[in-house]
Image: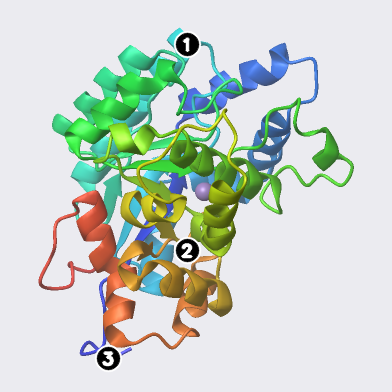
């Protein structure tokens, strides 16, 4: 591509791991007795040598793959399920280490990385303080939470300190997938559908919808939520959600000031992680606007070249393409805008 047409590329759902989390998760595996879909997934990732090495690497092959594909920046986040399967104190301690390590990598490669913080929702007050530290002191650009924690969802009152901190800091929450809770996962398990083939999306879309119908966003209108995987199915479903929310009213659901789709358009943005398919991308742009769609790869789980090929095949107008590749990420996450392309390594 000529320099005249080169557009800055920021990928916004890119995973890394630290050895401390791997060790802690190995402990969870040793202590586990019953089947758990997240443990199953973590074991498969840890056992896949190339994947495991790519998750640990922040200074070598990752940068080479970015260079080879014209990815200027990865917005990094700790791999799912992160610290959310650990005991509260361990979880908070490893979250702090992960945030410090991430900040160090960004200092070393300031043009190549930005980061989303990890917090341990198990201890909400401490999580809120860690989020503030991560944003104010470590200069991270938001926080990523892997859907439920012990089967509980962020609309539940105990998590209010985390949501209030994010809203007050005007920093987004990236609501990332994990598998449905074991009690829910039975029907998936017959054909191992609990993970990225369906369960991740079903679980995380449900979580996003819960945030909307709970009325939470009437109380915290500044809260910004990021959903990967083209919005985890919700953009496709928005019209029917509005219709059924109005048509089938039940006492369990609070009254909302607006239609569900309006919260989705105002409080949410979506990323393209793992959704390298033109019709799905077009739906997101048509339903939400090109200013609500952000490029993501889901490195190292998805192929960088395929992600860019999927976007390029969509024949976007130049303004849409620039919005999706970098401008929206700069705005949503507060990433510094560089007038010139960052220096190549
Ligand atoms: Mn991911």
Q: What distance separates the C-alpha of mark 3 from that of mark 2?
A: 25 Å
Q: Where, by quadrant of the figure, is residue 18 drawn?
A: top left
Mark 2: few, some, or many residues within 10 Å (few <14, many ≥20)?
A: many
Which mark sits nearer the N-terminus, 3 or 2? 3
- Residue closest to the eye, 244 or 187: 244
Q: Which residue is mark 1?
A: 88
Task: Say if 26 sits above or below 67 in the image.
Answer: above
Visible residue check, residue 274:
no
Q: Which residue is mark 2?
A: 272
- Residue closest to the eye, 45 or 323: 323
Quadrant location, the C terminus: bottom left
Residue 9 at x, y percent in the picture: 31, 69
Q: What distance separates the C-alpha of mark 1 from that of mark 3?
A: 51 Å
Q: Which residue is mark 3?
A: 2
In the rendering, which numbered label is found on residue 116? none
Residue 173 at x, y percent in the picture: 35, 40
Q: Residue at x 40, y 21 (%)?
A: 159
Mark 3: few, some, or many residues within 10 Å (few <14, many ≥20)?
A: few
- Residue closest to the eye, 262 or 153: 262
Task: Say if 123 sits above or below 56 in the image.
Answer: above
Image side of residue 159 versus residue 35, left or right: left
Q: Which of the two marks, 3 or 2, is nearer to us in this view?
A: 2
Q: Residue at x 37, y 48 (%)?
A: 258
Q: Residue at x 46, y 46 (%)?
A: 15
């Amino acid at each position: 591509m000529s320099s005249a047409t080169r557009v800055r590329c920021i990928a916004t759902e890119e995973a890394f791991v630290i050895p401390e989390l791997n060790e802690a998760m190995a402990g969870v595996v040793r202590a586990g007795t019953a089947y758990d879909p997240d443990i199953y997934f973590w074991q498969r990732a840890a056992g896949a040598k190339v994947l495991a090495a790519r998750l640990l690497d922040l200074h070598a092959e990752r940068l080479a793959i970015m260079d080879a594909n014209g990815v200027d920046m990865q917005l990094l986040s700790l791999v799912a399920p992160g610290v959310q399967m650990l005991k509260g104190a361990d979880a908070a301690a490893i979250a702090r280490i992960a945030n410090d390590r991430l900040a160090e990598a960004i200092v070393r490669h300031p043009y190549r990385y930005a980061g989303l913080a990890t917090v341990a929702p198990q201890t909400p007050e401490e999580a809120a303080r860690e989020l503030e530290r991560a944003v104010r002191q470590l200069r991270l650009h938001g926080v990523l939470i892997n859907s439920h924690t012990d089967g509980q969802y962020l609309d539940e009152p105990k998590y209010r300190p985390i949501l209030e901190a994010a809203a007050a800091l005007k920093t987004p929450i990236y609501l990332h997938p994990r598998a449905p809770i074991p009690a829910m996962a039975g029907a998936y398990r017959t054909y191992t559908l609990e993970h990225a083939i369906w369960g991740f999306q079903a679980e995380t879309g449900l979580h996003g919808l819960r945030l909307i119908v709970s009325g939470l966003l009437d109380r915290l209108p500044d809260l910004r939520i990021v959903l990967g995987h083209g919005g985890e199915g919700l953009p496709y479903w928005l019209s029917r959600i509005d219709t059924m929310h109005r048509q089938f009213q039940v006492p369990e659901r609070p009254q909302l000031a607006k239609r569900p789709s309006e919260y989705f358009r105002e409080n949410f943005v979506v990323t393209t992680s793992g959704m390298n398919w033109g019709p799905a991308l077009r739906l997101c742009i048509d339903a939400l606007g090109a200013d609500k769609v952000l490029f993501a790869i889901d490195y190292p789980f998805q192929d960088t070249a395929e992600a860019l090929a999927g976007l390029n095949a969509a024949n976007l107008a130049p303004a849409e393409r620039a919005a999706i590749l970098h401008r929206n990420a700069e705005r949503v996450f507060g990433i510094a805008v560089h007038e010139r392309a960052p220096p190549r390594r």
